[in-house]
Image: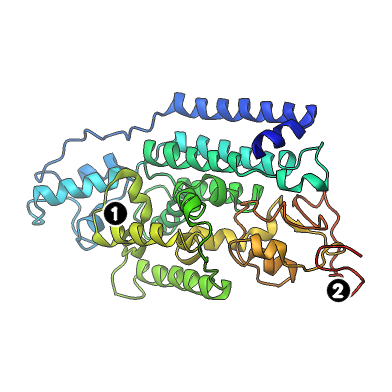
Amino acid sequence: MKIRDWFLLLSIRQRAVLLLTLVLSSLIMGVGFLGDRGAPPNEDLNVDVGMSIRQIAPELGVTGKALARELGLPLDVSKSKNFRELDVSPDELSHAVHHLLSHTDATAKYYIFIALVLIGFVYLNFLGRPDGAGSGHRRSWYPRLPYNLALIISVGIAGFYLGKSPNPMEGIVKVFKSMVGLYPDPVAKATAFIFFLILAVIGNKMICGWACPFGALQELAYSFPIFRRLRRLKLPFVFTNTIRGGLLLLVLLFLFGVLGGREGFVIYHYINPFNLFNMHFEAVSILLTVIIVLIGSFFVYRPFCQLICPFGFVAWMFEGLSISKVRIDKEKCIQCGACIGACPCDAAKDRVYDRKLKADCFSCGRCLNVCPVDAIRYGSNFHLNLSVSIKPRSEGRDRHGRK
């Protein structure tokens, strides 16, 4: 009944916005599928060990260094020798080619990401709180169904149907790989990364919260009804961010050869859960990562996003630039802890207490309908004038906002 109550309370203006958003997002997805149905080009590429790296690498859209690294060869190996001379077996060559082709971007996914971020942005900013709903209808605000539907589209279409690439994690990793010569088009890789970063600041990490397929899969697991009553573990942000940032630093040290003495070694390749969407687990560690993360997601909120994802770490550094985000009116806030309890991580707590280093907010919306004094909203500075001081609880109000 909640979604029905929410819809009935929408104003005519909001219903018009809802219809326009659904039409526009459908058109965006349609344009993407018309241009690209997700089948990787060159999937029928014929290769044999009589060919050389120089002959095959351009067809795969990578540099000779990238193909050499995939085959376990030194990056400076001769690119003109055939694979037979380099002691590469037909099976090894086929496996390397198949893996590199799995990284071919399905460009329709970019359109899916835009559409999902658009839906999330409009829903959180304009539709979640119906114009006809007062504070007494708080429990009817921001029903979960629209969010869950967006997550299902992300997992089903942007994930399993269109495959692993592109995705936000690859968006940043490929930039670093192009810097050591593993991709021939660093500008294109940087452009893809900037695309994901823009979607992250349009709405606070909305690309992560609403559109990323593996992020969506973790979100759905965490929201699974059977496990809702379990005691959930909130990992301290200092702990998660230290691990995530430290892992990124370690990856860069290995990638650039500072550690290991060999350029091109990418740790993320061995823990990349997006391989799930191609059902391609070339390393046991990848399969273990997927299993551990998905099981862990029933008990911990987005463990891969919080502990491992390099894009999540970089996007966190740009959260201050977000156009719209969860905002707390410090004049109204009584620090009752309702939003802190609803938030699955430290994001609400860090914002209530105005900490300098705030935990990632994934724009999940859980905190937006629990505040007893209506001090929390999703929007921009233009929608809500926020003060910088926190009113102490001692001004004659109890924890429910009553005088």
Query: Is 358 or 293 nearer to us in this picture?
Result: 293
Residue 349, by quadrant, is bottom right
Evaluate whether residue 219 shows in this view: yes
Quadrant where the C terminus sits is bottom right
- 123 sits left or right of 156 in the view: right
* Residue shown at the point (57%, 75%) measured from the top left: 238
Circle 2 residue: 392
**Residue 387 in the image: x percent, y percent?**
86, 63
Q: Report which quarter residue 355 is drawn in.
A: bottom right
- Element type at mark 2: loop
Residue at the image position 21 percent from the left and 50 percent from the top: 96
Chain-order first, disc 2 or disc 1: 1
Q: Let me know if residue 194 appears in the view.
A: no
> What amino acid is at disc 2?
Pro
| Side (left or right) of 267 relative to 340 | left
Please report the residue visible at 52 percent of the width from the left and 52 percent of the height from the top: 223
**Three-letter amino acid code at the position of disc 1:** Ala
The dot on residue 272 is none
Distance of mark 2 from mark 1, alpha carbons? 58 Å
Q: Quadrant of residue 350?
A: bottom right
Seen at 20% across and 52% down, the residue is: 79
**x%, y% of residue 244?**
48, 69
Query: Of discs 2 and 1, which sits in the foreground?
Result: 2
Residue 242, image x and y in percent? 51, 74
Depth check: give the residue in front, 123 or 321: 123
Q: Is residue 162 left or right of residue 283?
A: right
Label total for image = 2
Q: Secondary structure at mark 1?
A: helix
Which residue is labeled 1 in the image?
66
